[in-house]
Image (tube, rainbow, N blue to C red):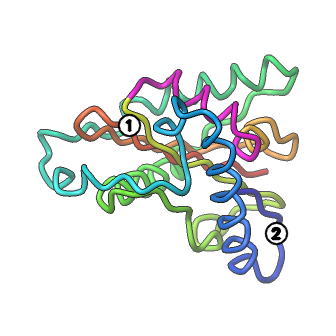
Amino acid sequence: MTLTNHPTPRYRVTLTALSLALTALFTLSSSPARATEVLAATPHRTLASHVSDPRRVQVGSDAWQLFKLTNASRGRFGLPSLRLDRDMSVVARRHSAAMARAGELFHTSNVDVYLHGIHWHAWGENVGYTPGDLASIQTAFMQSPPHRENILNHAFGHVAIGTVRVDGTLWVTVFFYG
């Protein structure tokens, strides 16, 4: 999902999220092996009951590695590295935990709350889950046109990454802004 700073971003978020969900669904449906790696339209409900058990949850241990993979992807296309926003990464981690708790993917509903007080003109978000490793989700993001667009967007200079692993399934939220 990508946004620009307009007076009514909530409406744009809803339409863009719907568009992204449909695009991801059609993109991934042609590759069944990738359908479990990302993303927007397929509910994943098997883990919701386990999120409350702290022995089954790892919080944020993969975020730094995904940050490095994201910048490596940008570097292959001659783009500058993104700067990590650690404070907003806490918010992204909460979003990943909420998705794991719900057992499904969803996008942030109120961008203004997250970016309040930050000067920005463009914003995007990638969300996903995978039973695999970080490389598999980064590959899936790069093979999905809307997610790849966010990773390679010239307008973005900052990123926040939140990860939560529940029973081996990695839930990811990546906020981009610039």
* Disc 1 crowd, CA 10 A, few/some/many (<14, 14-19, 20+): many
Q: Which residue is mark 2?
A: 5
Where is residue 65? Give x, y as percent.
50, 23
- Left or right side of 86 for 76: right
Where is residue 136? Give x, y as percent.
52, 24
Q: Main secondary structure of the magenta part?
A: helix
* Disc 2 crowd, CA 10 A, few/some/many (<14, 14-19, 20+): some
Note whether 44 is above or below 14 in the view shown: above
Front in this rendered view, residue 147 or 88: 147
Front in this rendered view, residue 62 or 19: 19
Q: Residue at x 78, y 60 (%)?
A: 120
Front in this rendered view, residue 5 or 21: 21
Q: Which mark is residue 170?
A: 1
Q: Residue at x 66, y 67 (%)?
A: 18
Q: Residue at x 25, y 51 (%)?
A: 46
User: Looking at numbered disc 2 in the image, what kind of residue is underneath it?
Assistant: Asn
Q: Which mark is residue 51?
A: none
- Give SS at disc 1: strand
Residue 52 lies in magenta, yes or no? no
- Left or right side of 121 for 165: left
Magenta span: 132-147
Number of marks: 2
- Give SS at disc 2: loop
Task: Mark 1 and mark 2 in contact? Answer it, CB < 8 Å.
Answer: no
Residue 141 lies in magenta, yes or no? yes
